[in-house]
Image (spheres, rainbow, N blue to C red):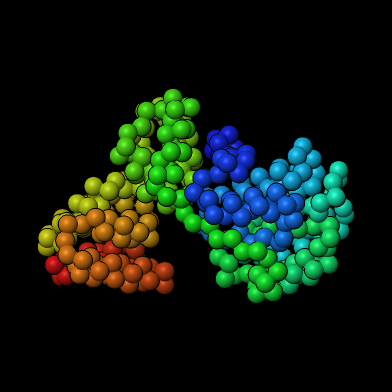
Amino acid sequence: MNDIWTEKYRPSSFDEIIGQEKVVERLRSFVKQKNIPHLLLSGPAGTGKTTLSLVIAKELYGKDWRQNFLELNASDARGIDIIRGEVKSFARTKAIGTDLPKIIYLDECDALTKEAQQALRRTMELYTSTARFILSCNLSSKIIDPIQSRCAVFRFKPLEKKDVENVIKNIAKDEKLVIDDRTIDLIFEMSEGDIRRVINILQSCASIDKKISESVVCEIVSAAKPKEIRQVLEMSIGGNFIKARDILLNVMLDHGLSGMEMIKQIQKEIINLNTKDEIKARLIEKCGEIEFRMVEGSDEFLQLEALLASFSIIK
């Protein structure tokens, strides 16, 4: 269901893409010259990498773009066979209806194995005259150096608050949703600059009620309300450890949250506490230590109790 709004509000031209002005400007010049190098698009999820790749294909090939554009998700097939098979077969043939090379878009290519990346490097060398590669990843450090050196690298940044607010307000207007500024702030905080997540949250909330409130958003994303986390923090820092512990466990059970999710929400809310920066720094340092213990397999409830106990001592 959630893909419906994602496609509906996907930008179809360079002018509609928000938050990546410098990247768009450079890519637009490549398209204008009809001379696209191999591209490596790196950045967080939901910031426009796939959308920009589709726009490039549509601008270059017009109505024939689907025949000359191959989109693959490397996390679905991450071995060497996908490179030797489907990618190589598509790359070795000429484009239809144009003298320009085809475009092969590999999403999440940082999931490719090292062997597959070596095969990809060789394919990029052999078929430069008939195909250009656009590689998309969250972490460019996982892409081998020989591939990075063959690509023009573009780094995407999370969308700023003003950009996300504009998207939310435009969607609310089109879909006749009622949403206040506090709820918009909450959606931005939950999305962390991921516009795809913003759209999915809005669509899920709209299926329940056209009037979107903070409580509905928290229910949809399975997150505790900021005021609940703030209450836990203030009680633990104030020395009321038992009460803070009881509220924390109730919040986890009510919202079905894991220990890792609780740690992340606590860390975010620490920044908003009305206390000295030195205290905030010590609290966040303790969050990092507890998160590491959880990653290593320690009991979630025990570690969260230890976190609140350390907060009580830090006061």
Q: Residue furthest top?
A: 176
For residue 149, side relative to residue 265 (left or right): right
Q: Residue at x 81, y 51 (%)?
A: 100
- The image shows a total of numbered marks equal to 0
Q: Is residue 7 visible?
A: yes
Q: Residue furthest left?
A: 239
Q: Quadrant of the N terminus?
A: top right
Q: Dividing the picture into quarters, in which one does residue 130 lie?
A: bottom right
Q: Vertically, is 101 above or below 64? A: below
> What percent of the width, then of the height, locates residue 266?
29, 58
Q: Residue at x 60, y 44 (%)?
A: 14
> What percent of the width, then of the height, locates residue 192?
42, 52
Q: Residue at x 87, y 52 (%)?
A: 94
Q: Residue at x 59, y 70 (%)?
A: 142
> What percent of the width, then of the height, locates residue 243?
15, 55
Q: Is residue 306 visible?
A: no
> What percent of the width, then of the height, locates residue 7?
60, 37
For residue 214, side relative to residue 86 (left or right): left
Front residue of 293 and 75: 75
Front residue of 156 and 112: 156
Q: Vertically, is 192 above or below 141? A: above
Q: Quadrant of the C terminus?
A: bottom left
Q: Residue furthest bottom?
A: 145
